[in-house]
Image (cartoon, rainbow, N blue to C red):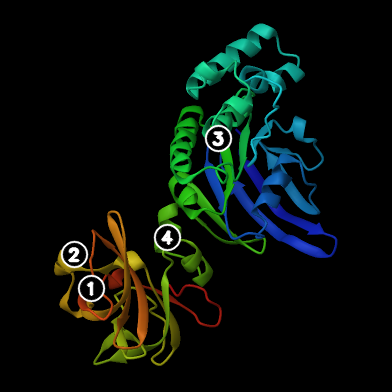
Amino acid sequence: MANVELKQVVKRFGKVVVVPGLDLEIVDNEFIVLVGPSGCGKSTVLRMVAGLEPITGGEISIGGRVVNHMSPKDRNVAMVFQNYALYPHMTVRENMGFSLKMRKHSREEIEERVTEIGRILELTPYLDRKPSELSGGQRQRVAMGRAMVRDPDVFLFDEPLSNLDAQLRTQMRMELRKMHLRLKTTTIYVTHDQIEAMTLADRIVILKDGAIQQVGTPIEVFEKPANVFVARFIGNPPMNILEGTFRVLDGKRCVVAGKSTFPVTEGKAQSLADGAPVLVGIRPDSIKMGDNIKKLPEEWLCSGEVVVSEILGGQSHLEIVIDGDNELIAEVEGRVVAHPGEIVPIGFEFDRMALFDPETSNALL
């Protein structure tokens, strides 16, 4: 069992506290993604698990063994870095087999393992080439292969795709997902790219200032963000956040935001008192246009004035003003040709609306 557990892990650099006390349990074979803005401590957490960075306090265990004072080579983890870190004078075959050679494996065993992993990663034609003769995507696969040949308990990835172009990133995400499905090895992956997080993770850990904001499946953190930070960080475009007041009008629960009135569906924020201040969260993709508004209740429909629109292949992004004072970003299906100043009918999936406490920024359940 290669579960990984962090108990009240603290990291300080001098007087600066980077990780104030992190608790996280990663189960065997799970693909966990640590995500957050630059400087949030995600790479530091990864390096502490690897043993490349000593912890200031707390406890880290891998497979039930406390590894606080173990050297990196004794933890049986394999790390893939952002910059590949390949030996330029060695062939792909030699790069991939180097760690096994250092561990005194036989030549036959090394050759067998390198050949097997080369086949899995489709590197067989390149085994006798030098890194300088490979593309960026091929070099990244070699770095992955070098980690895979060791058959580690845990894979650690530190933003491995950030140096690749958009097309290669998409291709390599698929490779990583296939690799995990095939090997079923516990994986901790660090990125600032939420698309990588949403597509790769079994669970996402969202960090801010070294503290966990939320842990959940990609759908959970997208549809039910724990606070405003998560709501704005996960999703592109980010969630629309409006200031409002909870009201009960004619017996119906709603939020009044400026000149707009949004109905609150059953089961949401039951404890709110009439007149309580709230923040309203509306996902851009929950704003509908065209034929998609026909399925929505009439009270969920209105109109808005287009400020600007962008066509992005099969989707369109529009900035829309409703009731003259609330600006919202909408993400709608299809190629929507709309001109600034045009009034367009829109609808909202208000059952997906989120409400937050303005003081704590936490979600109101």
Dot 3 lies on which element?
helix
Amino acid type of the residue tagged 2 in the rendering = Asn
The mark that comes first in sequence, 2 or 1, is: 2
From the image, which quarter does the N terminus lie in? Answer: top right
Residue most extreme to the right: 14
The mark that comes first in sequence, 3 or 2, is: 3
Image depth: mark 3 or mark 1 in front? 3
C-alpha separation, residue under disc 4 versus residue under disc 1: 20 Å
From the image, which quarter does the C terminus lie in? Answer: bottom left
Q: Which residue is mark 3?
A: 136
Dot 2 lies on which element?
helix
C-alpha separation, residue under disc 3 versus residue under disc 1: 44 Å
Amino acid type of the residue tagged 3 in the rendering = Gly
- Find residue 317 and report its horizontal and vertical position in percent: 33, 65
| Residue 347: assigned label | 1
Q: Quadrant of residue 294?
A: bottom left
C-alpha separation, residue under disc 2 versus residue under disc 1: 8 Å
| Residue 292: assigned label | 2
- Give the residue displayed 51% in from the left and 73% down from the top: 362
Q: Which residue is mark 4?
A: 222
